[in-house]
């Protein structure tokens, strides 16, 4: 049974997040790297949004492994509809689980801005 915005607010979510979950979770259908560590996203509801990942490159962050543009530009949408990168493209991430960095589709939507 679908929850209402009020129910999500009662769970401690902020208004934006509560509305997102009450309206139904989104799935990323395409991702295209753009200038300055941003990604152009298309969602299953037809929305197009831009996600700025530049703030993720902080000291000790797993994202530092993607700081080279050619590494960052290898972004793809995984089977779960999330953003993902294989750290070493020659390694099978279905066998070596710690070769993959992913970013939750919900966070991608909530932290992106409409185009």
Image (cartoon, grey):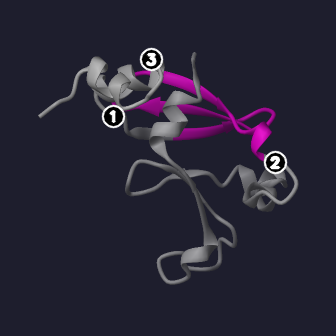
| Front tag of 1 and 3 | 3
Badge 3 is on which residue? 15
Say if 86 sits above or below 7 in the image: below
Structural distance between the alpha carbons of marks 1 and 2: 27 Å
Q: Is residue 63 magenta?
A: no
Badge 1 is on which residue? 25
Task: Say whether marks 1 and 2 touch (CB < 8 Å).
Answer: no
Question: Which residue lies at the image location 33% right of the left edge and 34% below the top edge?
Answer: 25
**Quick one: quadrant of the N terminus?**
top left
In the image, taking residue 47 as reference, residue 101 lies left or right, namely right
Residue extent of the magenta highlight: 31-56
Within-10-Å neighbours for mark 1: few <14, some 14–19, many 20+: few
Q: Is residue 40 magenta?
A: yes
Is 34 in front, or is 12? 12
Q: Secondary structure at mark 2?
A: loop
Badge 2 is on which residue? 57
Nearest to N terminus: mark 1 or mark 2: 1
Say if 43 sits above or below 29 in the image: above
The reply to whether residue 45 is visible in this rendering is: no
């Amino acid at each position: 049974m679908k929850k209402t915005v009020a129910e999500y607010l009662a769970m401690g979510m902020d208004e934006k997040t509560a509305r997102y979950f009450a309206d139904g979770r989104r799935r990323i259908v395409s991702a295209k790297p753009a200038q300055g560590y941003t990604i152009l996203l298309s969602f299953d509801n037809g929305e197009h949004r831009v996600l700025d990942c530049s703030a993720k490159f902080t000291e000790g962050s797993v994202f530092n492994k993607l700081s080279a543009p050619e590494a960052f530009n290898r972004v793809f949408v995984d089977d779960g509809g999330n953003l993902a990168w294989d750290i070493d493209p020659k390694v099978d991430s279905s066998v070596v689980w710690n070769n993959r960095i992913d970013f939750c589709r919900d966070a991608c939507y909530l932290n992106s801005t409409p185009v």
